[in-house]
Amino acid sequence: MSAHYQLKPSIVRVLLPKPFHAPFDYFVPKESFVEVGHYVQVPFGKSLVWGVVWETNVLSTLPEHQIKEIRSISSLPPLSPAARKLLEWTARYTLAPLGSVLKMTISVPETLKESEKDFLSNAKSLDIKPSLLNHDQNFSATALKEAVAKKEFQPFLLEGVTGSGKTEVYFEGIKEAYGKGRQSLILVPEISLSAAWVDRFIDRFGITPTIWHSDITPAKKKKAWRSIVNGEASVIVGARSALFLPYQNLGYIVVDEEHDHSYKQETGVVYHARDVAVMRAQLEQCPIVLSSATPSLETLYNVQQGKYKHLILPERHGVSTLPSVTLVDMKKVKGDKVIKWISPPLKEAIQKTLDNNEQSLLFLNRRGYAPLLICHACGHHMECPNCTTWLVYHKASQMMQCHQCNYSHKLPSHCPECNHQGLSPCGPGVERIEEEIKTLFPNARLLIMTSDTLSSPKKTEASFKKIHGQEVDIIIGTQVMAKGHHFPFLTLVGVIDGDMSLGGGDLRAPEKTYQLLYQVGGRAGRQNLPGSVLIQTHTPEHPVMQAIQNYDHKRFLDLELESRSALKFPPFGKLAALIISGKDPSFLEKYVHEMARQIPHHEKVQVFGPAPAPLFKLHHWYRWRFLIKTEKEIGIQKVIKYWLDSLSIPSTLKITVDIDPYSFT
Ligand code: ADP
Ligand code: ZN
């Protein structure tokens, strides 16, 4: 029935991109017609807001005079049923308000205002450079192409050592989806990765993919959003936020470097992009590829359970081989008094690499000069006034900086506590390694690569150019250097502190360390020149170090799975964290203990806490944590919802629910 003939205007429910769990009722204007999924603009409070029609033909319980009328209706295609279901699933899973999830879809509301015409360019045919796949690559590519052609939900784990051609293989699926007129979504973990990725894509296919991440300009964002919603964009490469865009006919999803922890969004809607991507593929009924050299335990477990198909590329492509790995036992070299951070074996290896006119990468995941400054007279540590952290000393800028909240001030000449002159740096950061390298190799050309020095795409590009042009001998870098990059002349990777990420109360610490060391080591010897990796460690006997040295991923995983199974940790049980924060520490402490008295009792649910968070103070907010552990068959969300519903949470406190937590700070 058309709205023209109705006596009374019909009522619809409109979901708004605001932190509400439910949609609101609105009248449809006379002579207008709306369907579920349409973008509409409605009055809300004192302003006009774009939302999405969630339900039609509604019998409202509100008195008529309280119901306002839709102001305008966008002519863009409606949000698809699969996309709407994804939003509902995400809200249920993360316990975030449905409207907050929608906000990730309507990320460029300005573009809905305009009644601009979309000039659809004629679809270009791909100008594909032929690539001769090797036997293993061909087997995997065929499986992907078949799945894309069938348009069935099927998750794949594409596991292959670094440089084995995983990208080449999943490109084949894009080709297939493109040929069928369907959209492909490629998720990548880091913005820095996408520049190299895009160049390679253009080189291969002759078309430019649509790029989506938080740093693109508003104009580009608008253009990208429209081309996605009207179906013009055929290949979209983006960061995790690209997952919630209004695709019209998604036919293929890739999650590159699926193990990467930056896929977990920690603020706002707390979700893991890999997991939501698998759900999106299921709702869209399309295949999804999780690609990695070091797959996450969760994904491998799904392979073991027969849920995911396993595609394996066991060797590097061509003549390139995996680098040799040597552990340097730092307990044994400690006696040498000339050594600060570079052990004799590492020094020797760097010298050899210099002599061969090849490049070295020294990896230390710590920006600045020293992680803290101490007064030798009174023992005072320089702390951030806003956070429970030490201030990091940046020598180049002569600043003390908090890496949590970015607070910074000039380096003081005297101890603020006892006025003693001169504070001593403790431990190394990349700048301090640079200093030592300068004294050891005065003629070597150095380059520091951290988020400080690669603060813009331009600077990043310039640095990469220098490396490719062999204008650099030794690169000193943090984790920004660990991933994805391909430098043909880089043959030595030296890890300054292999043990750095092993400590702490993180259940994934061994897994994360393994992945990081493997990835950074994988930068060595990627072309024709053989590579080697030296890892300085105080615990060479640790299972992680042994696995890295012997390329024995399988044994390491079995050990990890065993220990997680014994403790019923994920993937054998469910975990969630509640973080309660407030500005008044004593009020907060009282409240979290009150909360503890309302903890739901169930034999299959364990609640630990409340405990002060390791990062107790963050940007002026004090933080307490609960950890909830349940057996797998229990809906952990229900338990938490039941608990939270039984509380009246003061407006001065913030509660963050983190299902499947990755961060334990
Ligand atoms: P991964 O993604 O597994 O790290 P890549 O796909 O980046 O590996 O491949 C590593 C290098 O080997 C790249 O330079 C790529 O172009 C090259 N390569 C991989 N497979 C082939 C192939 N079949 N033919 C030609 N070059 C290939
Ligand atoms: Zn701070």
Image (tube, rainbow, N blue to C red):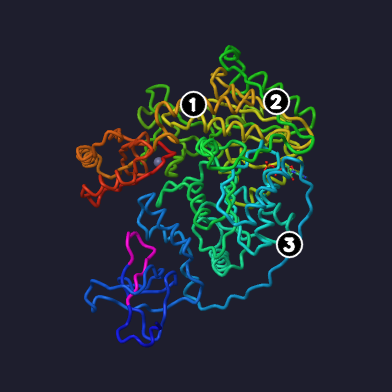
Q: Which residue is mark 3?
A: 126
For this view, does 95 lie left or right of residue 339?
Answer: left
Closer to the chain start, of discs 2 and 1, is 2
Rounded to the nearest whole Å, what is the CA distance between mark 2 and mark 1?
32 Å
Q: Are marks 3 and 1 in contact (CB under 8 Å)?
A: no
Vertical side of 548 occupied by 78: above or below: below
452, 73: nearer the viewer: 73
User: Looking at the image, how many numbered discs can be counted on the residues?
Assistant: 3
For ligand 1, the image quadrant comes to top right
Residue at disc 2, secondary structure: strand
**Which residue is pictured at 74% across the width and 55% down the height?**
203
Provide residue 494's location: percent of width, then percent of height. 65, 28
Rounded to the nearest whole Å, what is the CA distance between mark 3 and mark 2?
40 Å
Q: Which residue is mark 2?
A: 324
Q: Which mark is residue 426?
A: 1
Provide residue 445's location: percent of width, then percent of height. 72, 35
Query: Could you tell me the amino acid type at mark 3?
Result: Leu
Q: Which mark lies nearer to you, 3 or 2?
A: 3
Quadrant assignment, res 632: top left
Closer to the chain start, of discs 3 and 1, is 3
Quadrant location of the N terminus in the rendered image: bottom left
For this view, does 662 lie left or right of residue 126?
Answer: left
Rounded to the nearest whole Å, what is the CA distance between mark 3 and mark 1?
56 Å
